[in-house]
Amino acid sequence: MNALKLYFRLVWFLKTPFILLLDRRYRSIPYRLIKKLCEAIGLVWGEDFSDCDDFAWLFKAEAIKRGYNGTGFIIGRALGGWHAWNVALVKYSLCQIEPQTGVAFKKLKDYRAFFVIM
């Protein structure tokens, strides 16, 4: 998918205009691969040194290693504070991913994105 089209989809989906797209084209990720990527991270949670932002960066890195650049890093408010999680282009739709648990979702009221890097 081209970057301009993806930008407008992300704005609509995440309700934020603060989206930084670093490529011109994006390759979607198969939905069945999401859980495998979360398991491949192999990180154990630890305050400040292996927490949400580390899981989110590693999820994106695992996708890139397999040739899929259609994943993004989200910074926003969730779970009562600042949080980081992922967004992915899956075929012709988008989903958000909590990489610490492997849960993929369209929208959860407790998750509010502020800034996205893809």
Image (cartoon, rainbow, N blue to C red):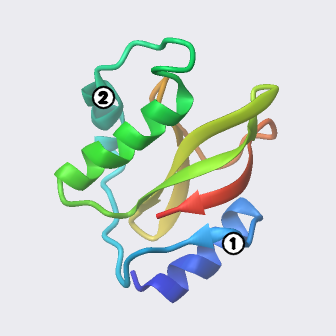
Q: Residue 76: x percent and y percent? A: 72, 45
Front residue of 71 and 114: 114
| Amino acid residing under circle 2 | Ile
Q: Which residue lies under the disc numbered 2?
A: 41
**Which residue sits at x=44%, y=31%?**
55
Residue 103 is at least partly visible in this image: no
Left or right? Give the position of 62 relative to 70. Answer: left
Q: In this picture, is 2 found above or below 68?
A: below
- Tell me where residue 82 appears, x and y as whole percent: 74, 35
Going by the image, does 60 lie left or right of 50? Answer: left
Q: Secondary structure at mark 1?
A: helix
Residue drawn at (51%, 65%) of the image: 93
What percent of the width, then of the height, locates residue 87? Answer: 52, 53
Q: Amino acid at mark 1?
A: Val
Lower position in the chain sequence, tag 1 or tag 2? 1
Question: Which residue does the numbered mark 1 point to in the structure image?
Answer: 11
- Asked whether residue 88 appears in the rendered view, the answer is yes
Image quadrant assignment for residue 25: bottom left
Q: Position of residue 26 (x, y in %)?
A: 35, 74
Binning the other alpha carbons within 10 Å of mark 2 as few (below 14), some (14 to 19) or many (20 upward) gives: some
Q: Is residue 27 above or below residue 50?
A: below
Q: Please report the residue visible at 68 percent of the width from the left and 64 percent of the height from the top.
A: 13
Whether label 1 touches label 2, CB < 8 Å: no
Q: Which mark is residue 102?
A: none
